[in-house]
Image (cartoon, rainbow, N blue to C red):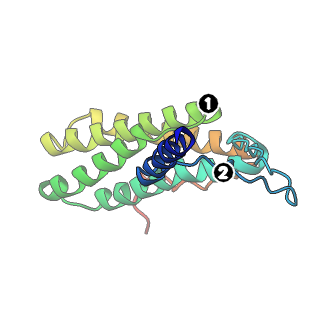
Amino acid sequence: MKNKTVFIVISIAIFLLTACGAKTVTQPTVNTAMPDIIPTPSVTSTPDPCSKENLSGEVTKINDLMRAFDDYSKLAASTPQGQMVQIIPPMQEIRRRAESQDVPECLKSLKVLQINHMNTVLDILMAFMSNPKSKDINQGIANARELHLQYDTEIARLLGLTMVPQPQPAPPSATPIK
């Protein structure tokens, strides 16, 4: 009888353990047919913006803003004094974009020349708005032209180009032509 009681107790214990949802632990299967492939990080190098093959594209980014500014400068030259207030704000916006533009170290001097030129032109236009007969305007125009020439020379140097001098208009003649 003692054996029968032990058998009943063990059977009840097993029944209770399985009925309570005992968790079974399974070992993860290993796929031996496919070896583990560990992805290797790819090495990506940042292209040098000052290298010969990338420099032209970097110069173009700077020069695109200068060309837009030059377009407004030409428009300003034929704009009456009273309407200059419509020309200056877009030029200031272009200048601000140029100031905030990140450039590589090799183009820092080009950017400085660009910003100096833009500031000089804007100063001239504002002086013209307040006093169109100011003697400082002619000097400012000469300074702006010189800064633009320095800017153009720097681009040529960076790109290995030779600048061809542009013909300058002849000064007005003191004697009338007959």
User: In this view, which residue lies farthest toward the bottom?
Assistant: 178
Q: Quadrant of residue 68?
A: bottom left
Left or right of 38 on screen, residue 106: left
Residue drawn at (35%, 49%) of the image:
94
The reply to whether residue 142 is visible in this rendering is no
Nearest the viewer among 175 and 80 is 80
Provide residue 168's location: percent of width, then percent of height: 55, 53
Question: Which numbered circle lies on residue 105?
Answer: 1
Question: Which label sits in the foreground, 1 or 2?
Answer: 1
Give the residue type at disc 2: Pro
Nearest the viewer among 134 and 3 is 3
Provide residue 161's location: percent of width, then percent of height: 75, 49
Residue drawn at (43%, 36%) of the image:
115
Seen in the picture, residue 85 relative to 13 is either above or below; the reply is below
Nearest the viewer among 14 and 53 is 14
Provide residue 174's location: percent of width, then percent of height: 40, 51
User: In this view, which residue lies farthest toward the front?
Assistant: 1
Give the residue type at disc 1: Glu
Left or right of 115 on screen, residue 14: right
Helix, strand or loop status at disc 1? helix
Image quadrant where one finds the C terminus = bottom left
Helix, strand or loop status at disc 2? loop
Provide residue 60's location: percent of width, then percent of height: 59, 53
Q: Identify residue for label 2.
A: 165
Residue drawn at (47%, 50%) of the image:
66
